[in-house]
Image (cartoon, rainbow, N blue to C red):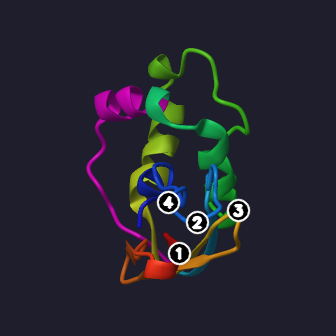
Amino acid sequence: MKLLTHNMLTSKCLKGVTVGYPLGIEAKEVKISEVDYNSEFISRIIPKLDYTAFYKAAESVGYAGDLPPQLIQDYENNEEFLKKMHHVLLEVEIINGELLCPESGRKFPISDGIPNMLLNEDEV
């Protein structure tokens, strides 16, 4: 699971959960996969991100070191920043671990890079 995907996931469908975002990450295995760099894509995806949640997710898997804690001004013209964002958003991949609902504590497994967000009947 890439951190770009993580930024879009919520456990709001769980019974009793009102927000369910951002999910915590407990990574057991992280892999780096090379992905072709596309500055235009990165520039366009950044405004759609919850940067604070993204930064915390990157921090939880040990890859926030080169990123600023706050989104920088004029990021579209900062090639160095865009490359760092590309790396963490698209090349850092959680292979095995768990996502944790911040409200209920429910854990969702990540296996072979795929988060399983399916709920049991009694959880809906």
**Residue 13 disc label:** 4
The residues tagged by marks 4 and 3 sit, at their Cα atoms, a distance apart of 13 Å
Query: Could you tell which of marks 2 and 3 lies nearer the N-terminus?
Result: 2
Q: Where is mark 3, residue-wise?
A: 102
Mark 2, secondary structure of its residue:
loop
Query: Could you tell which of marks 4 and 3 lies nearer the N-terminus?
Result: 4
Q: Where is mark 1, residue-wise?
A: 123
Q: Residue 11 in the image: state x and y as whole percent.
A: 54, 61
Mark 4, secondary structure of its residue:
loop
Marks 4, 3: nearer the viewer: 4
Q: Nearer the viewer, residue 52 or 100?
A: 100
Q: If the image is split into quadrants, where does the N terminus sit?
A: bottom left
Q: Residue 47 in the image: state x and y as whole percent.
A: 47, 26
Q: Which residue sits at x=60%, y=78%?
A: 107
Q: Looking at the rendering, which quadrant does residue 39 occupy?
A: top left
Q: Nearer the viewer, residue 11 or 5?
A: 11
On the rendered structure, is 5 left or right of 26?
A: left
Residue 109 at least partly seen: no
Task: State whether residue 19 is above or below residue 14.
Answer: above
